Amino acid sequence: MDHYVDIRLRPDPDFPPPMLMGALYGKLHRTLQDLDANDIGVSFPDHKTGVRARTPGDRLRLHGEKKRLETLLAQPWLKGLRELVACSEIAPVPAGVHHCVVQRRQFNTGSPSRVRRYAKRHDVSEAQAREIYAGVAGKQISLPFVELASRSTRQRFCLFIEHGKPQSQPANGRFNHYGLSHEATIPWF
């Protein structure tokens, strides 16, 4: 985790930034999966939280060792997006930075499919399950998210991303194929 690369979305009148970020992040996810990479992390330095302001921003930062980032960037995953993004050079992480965990958060939103699964799993009626989930569905989520399509089912879903509190010491661990981890930190600057 001693180097990083910034990939910034260029303004485009045809594609709104959330759509571009979803396409970029989806391609990154597929490439990390193909490489079986568990040593590359991501962060969204310009993200915003808040029910009305939540956005990942227009910059995706990749973190890792220099050789691994070179391997990742040598893959053709940015094909078709080159005109829509600006990719920085691989650079060393500045000295004296903080570290933070960037992880996926999943929320129980009380969707109809979740209600049906709960009813089936707990052998209750769907009406009872709907009542149980009524309070949950009213909660508003303030985390930024990226909308992605599942590689296996092709269904679209929102991947909510939480940047943890900055801490002085890094923590080692593995990253998933989204570049997220609930234990490993990325340099935060």
Image: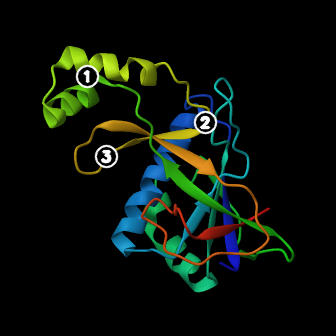
Going by the numbered disc 2, the residue's amino acid type is: Pro
Q: Is residue 132 left or right of residue 180?
A: left
Q: Position of residue 17 (x, y in %)?
A: 60, 36
2 or 3: tag closer to the N-terminus: 2
Q: Secondary structure at mark 3?
A: loop
At 62% from the left and 32% from the top, the residue drawn is 142
At 18% from the left and 28% from the top, the residue drawn is 119
Q: Is residue 28 left or right of residue 92?
A: left
Which sits in the foreground, 162 or 33?
162
Q: Quadrant of the C terminus?
A: bottom right
Closer to the eye: label 3 or 1: 1
Going by the numbered disc 1, the residue's amino acid type is: Ala
Spatial separation of the CA atoms under disc 2 and disc 1: 37 Å
Which label was assigned to residue 129?
A: 1
Is there CB contact under 8 Å for labels 2 and 1?
Answer: no
Q: Position of residue 136 (x, y in %)?
A: 44, 25
Going by the numbered disc 3, the residue's amino acid type is: Ser
2 or 1: tag closer to the N-terminus: 2
Furthest residue to the right? 96
Query: Is residue 90 visible in this depiction of the protein?
Result: no
Closer to the eye: label 2 or 3: 3
Q: Position of residue 64 (x, y in %)?
A: 61, 76
Q: Residues within 10 Å of mark 1 (few under 14, many from 20)?
A: many
Which label was assigned to residue 32?
A: none
Spatial separation of the CA atoms under disc 3 and disc 1: 26 Å
Q: Secondary structure at mark 1?
A: helix
The residue labelled by disc 2 is: 17
The residue labelled by disc 3 is: 150
Closer to the eye: label 2 or 1: 1
Q: Quadrant of residue 43?
A: bottom right
At 40% from the left and 34% from the top, the residue drawn is 108
Where 116 falls versus 61 (above or below)?
A: above
